[in-house]
Amino acid sequence: CGLEFEHWQLLVDRCHFNWIKLQCITRFFCSVRSILMQPQIVKEDSGSGLGSPDGNDILLEEETSELPKSIPGRKTGLVDFMSNLDVSHVGVARAIPTYAALQGIGSAFRNQETELLYRMSVRTDEFDEFWSHSWQLSPWPKIICLLFLKNGLAAGLTSNVAALTGCILSYFGVLPVVFGDSTAMPCYLWSQLGGILCFFPVLLLWRRHDRIFLDAGCINQSTPKAKTEGIRSMGGLLRMSRRMLVLWDVTYVERLWCMFELAAFMKSRSQPNTDDVVIRPTLLGSCALTIFVSFYVLMLVLSVLTFFNVKGIEVVLACSCCSMLVMYCTAAVYRGYFHSVQLFHEQLANFRLADSKCYCCSSGHVSSSGRPIMCDREIVTQCVGKWFGDEEQFEAAAHTWVSKAFSEQLGMHMFPLWLLLVVSSPFLWVSWDMAVSHHAIGDHEDANFWFIASVGYWLGAVPTCLAWAFYVASKLRTPCGARSWDCLANLLVIAASVPVAVVTFGFPVLMESFFDQLAVSAAASSAVLVTVGLLIWFSNVFQHALGGCWL
């Protein structure tokens, strides 16, 4: 009985102790919840501000009681303050790391977790980059574009290292055969598997620590007063930025505040340099993603068919169906991308500050509660007049500077070469898998051929083929208005690209007849392909031979 009593006493004491712990934990989380869920003071008739997806860019209401004491309330004083590129106080300048802006697959651009993002911001006296963009269209093109611009190089390097590691481990027999009994040769896919399993996690999760300004995360949106301070300090924040990234879409030039950001950044540079502003069409990321997925699917299908020794009409039909599906999608994306580039040049040539839109003018300068609000356009126009003399001089300067920066940075083919090499990495992976498979059956000559030819394919054949495909797509970029005609235009891009692909990728095989050893022929063909590819990508000879500029 004594033992039983002690057992029950111990059980009661333990339950009492656990109950105390549970109470403490509950009180702790209730305290945290009360802090995080404090009611926010939101002014119904104030606009959503610069960092809001609805684009209601109300700068100021005619209500001085809510104005910061350090900022003049009158319009003249406001213009003087903003045109001097000042900040209301040092606490306004807050930066977030790049990875924070892209976490959750760009949740900040989808109007999610903006409060959490602001709590991650820190005070700074300099920004590495100021992100300028419009909130009017879908956020996904911007998100994909930023992921490739900021994390694409890291994803390409790490995935190639992972693929090379898989190749080496397979070569020395550490990794097993994926398929062996039912194939014509041992099927090693470890380079392709390692590359793809590494590419997307790094693309989404890479932690880049550049200090950037993103309106949704660096402007305090909790109260109208704090939001107003951030918006009025925009000129000073731009002055503190080393570089400006413009995510250009068809609505960018139509937004008054986007034009103000561009004007303020130009004014903040004593000698404007094209390296200070980075301009990227938002569809660049979608184009890069399509190229990567298309190449990976096509290379995986071709390698599997080769391993299973599928020949004759079967391999022709399989390759044709797969290639048609993949190339049709890429052709449509190419045309859409170059159409967006065309719209960029047209908008830049014809844009007028007076045509830009803002919420205050569209609402008749009346808030939702019926109170009058100050006109943003008057403020911005007077600031631009102080900086450049008049609107026409700003428009001319912006056209010259932005157009030059855009052409220099994207290159002749309107696509960065480093990004092209990143998204065409699957060509390397499949070549390494082919080399290991030939080595496993004792065919060392073919193994050496694939190792060496992979360089020529990646650095030479791919840039050559895509340069031609980009050229054809740019000439057929205009939407036809009818789906059937657009389908025909996509098929024309494919039909024009196939002969060039056959010649470039078949060139190493053609060179075999001139050399006794496959390794020597692979080295010679790779040297030719790389030379031609680099000349086509960087030399104006190719451009002049095809009749001038792309667009």
Image (tube, rainbow, N blue to C red):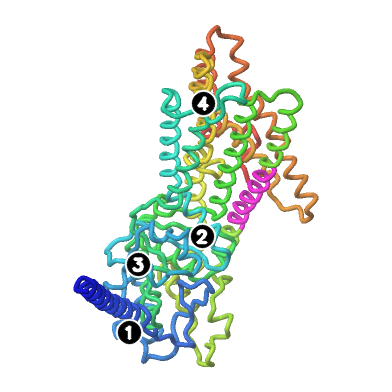
Q: Residue at x 42, y 59 (%)?
A: 103
Residue on which the image places disc 4: 454
Nearer the observer: mark 2 or 3; the answer is 3
Please tell me which of labels 1 and 2 falls first in the chain: 1
Q: CA distance from mark 2 to mark 4?
A: 47 Å
Q: Is residue 360 left or right of residue 488?
A: left
Q: Is residue 402 visible?
A: yes
Numbered circle sitting on residue 396: 2
Which residue is identified by label 1?
68
Answer few, some or many: residues within 10 Å of disc 4's Cα (few below 14, many 20 plus, some between 14 and 19). Answer: many
Marks 1 and 4, Cα distance to the nearest angstrom?
Answer: 63 Å
Distance between the alpha carbons at the discs numbered 1 and 2? 36 Å
User: SS for tag 1?
Assistant: loop
CB of mark 2 within 8 Å of CB of mark 4? no
Q: Amino acid at mark 3?
A: Leu
What SS does tag 2 mark? helix
Under mark 2, the amino acid is: Ala
| Mark 2 Cα shell of 10 Å, populated few (<14), some (14-19), many (≥20) | some
Three-letter amino acid code of the residue under disc 4: Ser
Q: Quadrant of residue 277?
A: bottom left
Rounded to the nearest angstrom, the CA distance separating label 1 from label 3 is: 17 Å
Give the spatial CA distance, label 4 vs label 3.
47 Å
Q: Is residue 522 visible?
A: no
What residue sits 36% from the left and 70% below the top?
A: 118
Q: Which is closer to the viewer, label 2 or label 4?
A: 4
Residue on which the image places disc 3 = 237
Q: In the image, residue 420 lies at what x, y percent? A: 52, 40
Is 242 or 501 nearer to us in this picture?
501
In the image, 288 versus 11, the foreground residue is 11
